[in-house]
Amino acid sequence: MLKTTLEMVAGHAEGQLGLCMYFHLLGKVHRRHQVSADMFEQWRDTLIQAAAEFNPRCDAQTRGAWEYVIDYAVSTMHQRFRAEAAQPSGA
């Protein structure tokens, strides 16, 4: 599961259209299920920690790269999350 998630956030950062759409959808779904926005940050921190913990070769540069791509995925989800929040109820 961790490997798949990391592959997905990396693919999203590379601009793979299906994954870009997927992370937008995740933001929308999380908003509709009333998940709080701060949970994205907790997911981010936990995912970065897991990536470093399970990769013995994870140095500062590698960790920085993971932070970059995971932050991009979180930003995409937040963008859609905020857009959903701005829509009137029932829209």
Image (tube, rainbow, N blue to C red):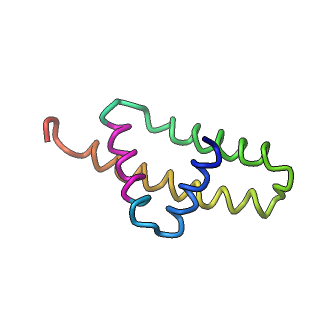
Which is more toward the observer, 47 or 87?
A: 47
Image quarter where the C terminus lies is: top left
At a point 36% along the width and 57% down the height, the residue shown is 21
Residue extending furthest top? 34
x and y percent of residue 51 in the render? 72, 47
Q: Is residue 29 magenta?
A: yes
Residue extending furthest bottom? 14
x and y percent of residue 89 in the render? 16, 36
Image side of residue 2 versus residue 36, left or right: right
At a point 45% along the width and 67% down the height, the residue shown is 16
The residue range painted magenta reads 21-31
Residue extending furthest left? 90
Image side of residue 46 versus residue 76, left or right: right
Report the number of discs: 0
Which is more toward the observer, 53 or 41?
A: 53
Is 3 rendered above or below residue 89? below
x and y percent of residue 61 in the render? 78, 64
Question: Residue 62 sits in which quadrant?
Answer: bottom right
At a point 60% along the width and 44% down the height, the residue shown is 44
x and y percent of residue 39 in the render? 51, 35
Q: Magenta span: helix, strand or loop, mainly?
A: helix
Image side of residue 14 versus residue 45, left or right: left
Question: Residue 50 sits in which quadrant?
Answer: top right
Q: Is residue 76 magenta?
A: no
At a point 13% along the width and 36% down the height, the residue shown is 90
Image quarter where the N terminus lies is: top right
